[in-house]
Image: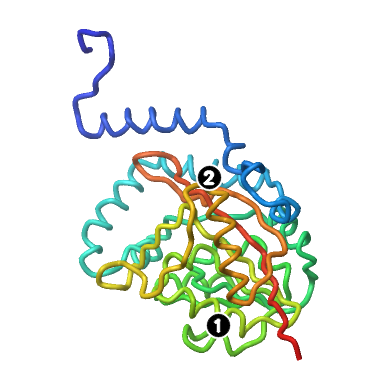
Amino acid sequence: MASNGLYRPRSALARAFYEKQLNDRQLEEFDQTEWYRIDTSRISEDLQKKFVQLHCDEETKEFLSSSIDKSSWVWTQIWYLLAKAVLKHFWSITDINGWLGRGSMFVLSEAQARRLLSAAGTQFGGGALVDVGAGDGEVSRRFAHLFSAKFATEISSTMRKALNSKGYTLLDTEQWWRGEFSCVCALNVLDRCARPRAMLRHARAALLPHGRLLLALVLPYKPYVEVTPDHKPLERLPIQGTTFEEQVASFVSFMREMGFELAAWSRAPYLCEGDFVQAYYWLDDSVYVFTPIQEAT
């Protein structure tokens, strides 16, 4: 016991446990409504009308609860640390997570996705969905069944195996856009790919005339590309502004130049399973539904 009355664990493992308890306590005290809140005084009337207010629903809480449980599996977390230390010399972090079956993400619950897509006039029960850069499929599998068929693209071999196990039909990463889809999902991939403009052009080409682009982008915009030598994109999106709301407005304006009209949007946390440090992590996601602007004939 320290002289000031504060407990200071001596061993490395005990310190890790203690620090995790402190971090998790901060998570418990955090006001989760902040994840979904925007400052309406900072956005235009049009953006206000198209904003869909979401909240932390039961499916979101289930993901958080599962993440909290998994982060407390001591020997599993130690195994993850040891495996990562060895495998990082041969594989990317994405491949490692896919092989270990860890690090799953969460953006929208089924109810949240249904509400957002419905606000954009989406018709359910038919057509095909494609998830571009789908990872392990955990993000889109929550709502992919709203469409008749589900497809995916992914460059990581270990993630492709995970997608196969979830019933996704895998498409070629260079040719997927030659298909026709009712919904194209680009969930947190624009800031992780080398050529985001090219990806958007492909999404535009792949959408049916009345299709929907479901897109999520972490703000503030800070691109990081795993496959480029300097981890910078070959194409950078022209997003300007310092606040969340300013960057949303800038991105929506850019998307119109790319041939997409905003139909609905929201703010939500981009959640990730935790580890030995804390139970879960999050980034601030802007989530949109765009429709393709039809060219005049």
Judge whether residue 47 can be spotted in this image: yes
Query: In the image, is residue 253 above or below residue 72?
Result: below
Looking at the rendering, which quadrant does residue 74 occupy?
top left
Q: CA distance from mark 1 to mark 2?
A: 36 Å
Q: Which kind of residue does numbered mark 2 sit on? A: Ser
- Residue in the foreground of this view, choosing between 235 and 83: 235
**Local secondary structure at mark 1:** helix
**With respect to residue 67, does 230 lie above or below?**
below
Quadrant that contains the N terminus: top left
Q: Position of residue 148 (x, y in %)?
A: 73, 76
Q: According to the image, label 2 marks what residue?
A: 66
In this orientation, does residue 56 appear?
Answer: no
Pinpoint residue 58: horizontal percent, then vertical percent.
67, 43
Mark sitting on residue 223: none
**Which quarter of the picture shows residue 120?**
bottom right
Q: Position of residue 263 (x, y in %)?
A: 72, 64
35 on left or right of 172 = right
Please state which amino acid type lies under the numbered disc 1: His
Picture residue at 55% right of the left edge, 82% below the top: 202
- N-term-proximal mark, 1 vs 2: 2
Residue 295 x %, y %:
71, 85
Q: Which residue is mark 1?
A: 202
Q: Residues within 10 Å of mark 1 (few under 14, many from 20)?
A: some
181, above or below 90, in the image: below
Q: Nearer the viewer, residue 45 or 60?
A: 45
